[in-house]
Every structure is written in C-alpha cells, then in structure tokens.
Amino acid sequence: MSIRIGLLAGLLLAAPGPIVPARAQATYDPGASATEIKLGNTMAYSGPASAYGTLGRADAAYFAMVNAKGGVNGRKISFISLDDGFSPPKTVEQTRRLVEQDGVLVMFNALGTATNTAVQKYLNNAKVPQLFIGAGGRKFTDPKNFPWTMAFQPNFNIEARIYANYILKNYPNAKIAILFQADDLGKDYVEGLKEGLGDKAKTMIVGEAAYQLSDPTIDSQMVALKASGADVFFHASTPKFAAQAVRKAADMGWKPLHILNVGVSSVGAVLKPAGLENAAGVISATYYKDPTDPKWADDPGYRAWLEWMQTYYPEGDRTDVLNALSYNFSETMVQVLKQAGDDLTRANVMKQALSLDFQPSMVLPGIRVKTGPGQYAPIRAMQMQRFDGRSWQLFGDIIEAQ
C-alpha cells in the first residue's frame, strides 16, 4: 500500500489562489522546487503493527488540508507514504526508493524503532533529514552520532524514568512485573525503568517476560508474570499486544497497578479492543491532548483538530489518539518548512528543525516543542494520566525530563 498526496490532489482541493511571484535566489535540493516539496514516509499499513497505519493516513489528510489552503510558502506538499509492514528489510527497500527514485527532500514521521534504526545510518550518510519519526529510542536523540535524525516524543528511556519516579514516590514497596517487546523499544524502556529505580530495581522487580512481534499471543507470559506476585505491572509494547495484556489481566482476575507506555494509550486502537471496562484504572504519561477527554471540548486547538478530522479525515477514528499525534507531527513539519522559506536545502531544513519554539495544537498547555543546537528532543515533559473507563484524566504536575 502507498499513499500519495501531491500536486494534483492539492490542486483539486484548492480554491483558486493568488499567483505566487517568481522567487529570487531560491535554493533547492532534491525534492524541492518552486512549486513542490516532497516528503517521504514509511508506515505499517500491514503486519503486526498495522494499527499505527492511521498515522500515515492522518499525515496525508493534514497535508491535503495544507495544499487546499495554498501550500507552504506557495508550494504544495507531495507526501509519499509506502507500506513497510513494520519489517526492517522492507523499510530499507522503501526508504531507498523514496530517496533515490522519488527524490524526497525529507523523510518524515516514519514509524518504528527497529525500522528507523535500519535506515538511520543510510539517511545520515546521505545527509537526508530523518525528522519527527514515530519512535522513541535513545539513539534518535543522539546528535553526536546521528545529526540528521530527530524524534518528536520524549525518548523511551526518559518516559520510563518518569514511571520509576512515580512508583518510588507513591508505591515505595511495590513488586514490579515487566512485559516487554524483544527489540530496541523494549530494551530502552526496561533500562530506563531500572535506571530510574536505581538500587531498588533489584528488589522491586520480581518478574520480566519478553515477547516477539511474531508471537500470536502473550498468554503464557502474562500467566508467568501474575505468578510472580507483582502488584505493579508495566509493559513496553505495541497496540496489538497492549490490548491483549489489558484483556488477559482482566480475564485472570489480576488487578495490579497497570502502567501503559504512551505509545499504546490510544482509546480507539488499544483500550476499546481490550474492553473499556477492563482498562479502567490503568495509568500512563502523556504530552498531548486526549481527544476523548471532554475537558478539551472548547479548547481552540482541539476544535481545529476536530474540524480537520470532519473535513479531511472523516473515516478516521476520533477516539484514536494516534490521529491527534499525527496532527502534531504534521503541524510541526509544516512549521519547519515555513521557517525554511525559499532555502529548501536539506541542510537548512535541518537547521530550522533545530530552531523551534512552537506550540502544536494538540500538545498539552505548558509543554512546547523546543529545539536548539545539540538539543534534538523536541518534547521533554509529560504529565501522568489515569483511564476512568471512558477517557484519560490528567493528574499531578507536568514533569520536565532532565
């Protein structure tokens, strides 16, 4: 599967607009011209992480809206999104196609830790910006080794440290069980949790179980973790397995404090399939507005998001927070392109990505996208939240990661 939102789609959607005057001294790299900016993307439209496919569809819908309004500095965005099935070898193939055949200016919001890892060296060697990727590994905020790579969310290690701090403060005698995906995603979360717990990790963690993306279920892992006697359960997973974990815990009558990583906190993609009644009481941390929370009903950012969903992505699930995330990613990418002006070289796009002080519409008040030289983590703060059976409820203060 592939999604292409380009000049034709933009022109069909757009009302006649003002003629853009000829630009003096405009500078372009491959993927940019006086009329077009090409963005490349790989996404799991199929395979075990296909629930994330809505990210690519929502990105396409956002750029369709931008094109309908005249584009960015008079240029239409051509968004080319290819299916990689969440398979690193396929990601390599599709990314090389996007760079070498389609000639994209930037790789934007490609999904996955292992998949982005597979192309990180290639893109950095080619000096192609790898921006606002849908992954939170520590390696994606490493300017010394990968200066052309930038994530968006707090990295997995930082997020796990926040959970560790919460546990130590509120459940100092907890017995913790961990379920994790057997890849870099799981490794970063587990390391972060242990680092955050410090010396207490050895006594507080009473059970660990890994699973492979190819596993049909995690039933055996869940049975073993319950048998550990844990009263706090943390898992670092992807939507399919997160939904299984929530449902299996309920089926077994296991009721620990259940902590979900932010990437699987979607009501539509995870908690509904698990059964909302089964998910009541789970906690997580977030940096964005949950579209299921009625507190945002009159919020201008939420209202803009809802209007966009109704107009440009009506088939999208309005309870799926992934669609709010895509809005933030795409809005920030457009801000970078606006700042780049007529200097649409890859070097300047990267420079502008490192010169942000911006409030995306669906990011929590008090949390801003801020970058600078050497600061490759646009979001470094989160707030705890609890699911009440209908929506997520924020609690506590915003926690700034160090």
Image: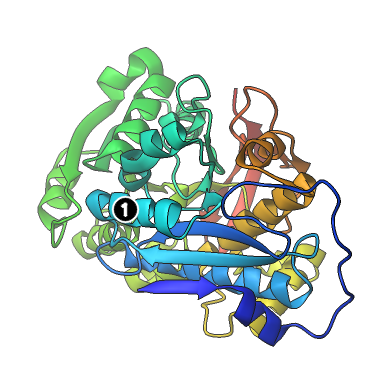
Quadrant hosting residue 98? bottom left
Q: Is residue 241 above or below residue 365?
A: below
Name the residue located 46 percent from the left edge and 69 percent from the top edge.
54
The spot of residue 14 in percent (x, y) is 75, 82
Q: Quadrant of the N terminus?
A: bottom left
Q: Which is more toward the observer, 189 or 169?
A: 189
**Above or below, comparing residue 322 to residue 157 in the picture:** below
Which residue matches tag 1?
A: 91
Q: Residue at x 71, y 65 (%)?
A: 35
Instruction: Locate residue 33 relative to residue 118 in the image: left or right.
Output: right
Coloring scheme of the render? rainbow
Question: Residue at the location (66% across, 64% down)?
Answer: 36
Tell me: 293 left or right of 220.
Answer: right
Task: Report if residue 270 is visible in the image.
Answer: no
Tell me the quarter of the picture where residue 58 sits.
bottom right
Name the spot of residue 268 as percent of width and height, x first. 46, 71
The local secondary structure at tag 1 comes to helix
Q: Residue at x 72, y 70 (%)?
A: 66
Which amino acid is tagged 1? Answer: Thr
Left or right: where 321 falls relative to 282: right
| In the foreground, 366 or 15 | 15
The correct choice, above or below, for 320 with respect to 342 in the image is: below
Q: Is residue 114 above or below residue 73?
A: above
Residue 46: x and y, percent? 29, 69
Residue farthest top in this picture: 199
Quarter assignment of residue 314: bottom right
Q: Is residue 17 visible?
A: yes
